[in-house]
Amino acid sequence: GRHAGLLGVEPARPRRALLSDTWLRVLVVGLGCAWLCTSLWLAWSLRRDPAGAASLRRSHEMTELSNEVLILRRQLASMVSDADEAAASGAGGTEPPPPPTDALGHADPAADTASRHPEFRLAMIVPWLGAELPRWFDLFVASCAGSAYLVDWLIFHEDAPIDVAAAPANVRYISLGPHGMGAHFGVQLARLTGEPNQTHTLVRLLQHAFATWPYAIVEYKPTYGDVFRDYLDGYTHWSYTDLDLVAGDLTAFVSRAELVELDILTFTFGDAVTHGRLYLRGQFAMHRLSAATSRLWLACEFLSASGGSGGGAGGGGGSGGLLHELRIKHARATRAQQRGEAFRPHFNSAEGCYSRVVATSPTLRVKYANRMIADFTSAPQVYVLLSGGGRRAAVRMCAGSEGDGTAGGLVGSPMRPTASSSAPASQRAACDPFAPPPPPPRASLLGNQRPVGALIPLVTHTNCSEWVEPRYRVCADVSGAWASELGADGAANGWNFFYLAGRWYRQRFTASHPAGLIEGALFHFQVWKRAYKRQGPQLAPIPPPGESAAFVLTKEGYRPLALRPAGGSSTGAGTGAYEYDEALASIDARLKAIERDGDHQPG
């Protein structure tokens, strides 16, 4: 036995080893029988209990999805870490991306390091009526911080439940106390219309109107610059605005030339070209704080002195003035209440009479600039980048992703088919929501648009804006071929309109947008807010002031996007972060679907 191995003969195995092999075989056979019996019993049980089978299947699916989430989060963390290392080491010796240039492509001497513009200041005025703030209010306020270099928001209210500590530095809350809005407007309008003896009556009627129909405040938008004049010391310009919007960096969309040379600047969303609508938008109508723009609204009969005709440029036969208008509404509301009927009076908006007054005042210099995004013509997803942590603010959407085919008119967007856009999708610029936003603000305020060519005379008519009374309509004749021509940069509807010295003009422009994106100064969600009011849980929480964040807005609500490192390139980690965020959102939706299915299972 000692030399059996050398001779090629198997040595005899000890008796103890043979016993061990026997027990091992018995153990394996026993475990196999147990597994087989368990499987047969489980299959028999599940056949008798379908609910148990569905529960087991859901549990298995949720476990797999949880594993996918874990893998994705690890990959995302690794990508962000790699991006940080690349930024710290110069990306392995590769050339760094070129520094961003200003919006017009001109070199600016130096970035302004001050927190405020040294010469101009714009006040965006918002009176709010109501005990509760809209569900999206936190997002609106957070977006205001992106324009702090040039713009303040003045929000007047009647002791609304506002968290003042959570507001950016350029958002001012002014409480007028209970019923204070009606009192303030009544006192100021009595003075401005030259009827101080009617102060008590105006206060009483306005307090009733604002308490009964809070929406009535929109009638008085044109008066804000005069009614709130005591709060505008230190400002060079003012604008009325709304809360159903989010702001990008307005500093990048207003030029110094416009601040100096224009009396009024309003932002459109492309419908001035597609539909010929020339009216002052309720979201942005910047007025120079001057005698030229003061009290223009007195030419509207429903805002004029009692017994006045409002017969200025926008007049059309007097209705008896502001006091008469309020008394009629109050009387009709009282009669309806006595009869147990609902009553909602007609309200005049700034899109009607006041726009006509402005458009027929030959001493004014007015510009209608195509720089806003609105949900009724936008892409199905709009991205909002909040400023903070060295990141600039932006409001943007993907070029060419409009949902109804009408978004080609937005802010000079290259969204209609052109020779260049007919290239294969792989050769087009990718839509990266995190592409570098506008550069830091500069005192020169270059803006994001450059005029192309001379001013061209424009023919107007009154056949547009059907919701406006015919006598107030001002419309551009866009029936010519020029309205559908593409600019040299491939942009559709790249036209702005002017009213100068009593004459109308159009002028083409080119706009600066990151590749694959369309940016706007503001995003107005007039339609989507209806869902936002109903679907509060769909609205994501907003971080504290000073913390950067990104959100994607849709008609269902808005949710956060995973941020890339500030200053990252438009490819690589940042795009991956966006893609992985979308993957996580898809998995989350699948998990919710599994949970919903479970709620409907028997047992």
Image (cartoon, rainbow, N blue to C red):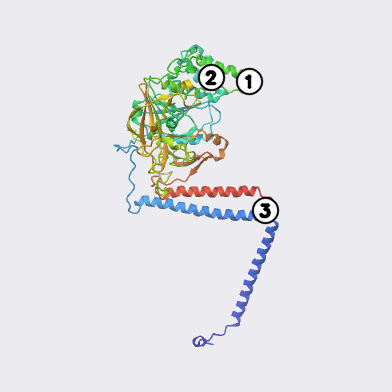
- Measured from the top left, where is residue 582 in percent x and y? 49, 47
Q: Give the residue type at disc 1.
A: Gln
- The numbered disc on residue 206 is 2
Q: Is residue 329 above or below residue 495?
A: above
> Which residue is located at x 55 percent, y 27 percent?
130
Q: Give the residue type at disc 2.
A: Leu
The residue pinned by badge 3 equals: 51
Q: Nearer the viewer, residue 463 or 124?
A: 463
Furthest residue toward right? 48
Labels 1 and 2: the sequence-earlier one: 2
Apparent side of residue 509 relative to residue 533 in the rendered image (left or right) = left
Residue 595 shows up from this direction? yes
**Regarding mark 3 in the picture, which secondary structure is present there?**
helix
Labels 3 and 1: the sequence-earlier one: 3
Give the quarter of the image for residue 412.
top left
The residue pinned by badge 1 equals: 337
- The numbered disc on residue 469 is none
Apparent side of residue 47 relative to residue 486 in the rendered image (left or right) = right
Crowd band around label 1 with a 10 angstrom C-alpha radius: few (<14), some (14–19), many (20+): few
Q: CA distance from mark 1 to mark 2?
A: 18 Å
Give the quarter of the image for residue 338.
top right
Q: Nearer the viewer, residue 173 or 344?
A: 344
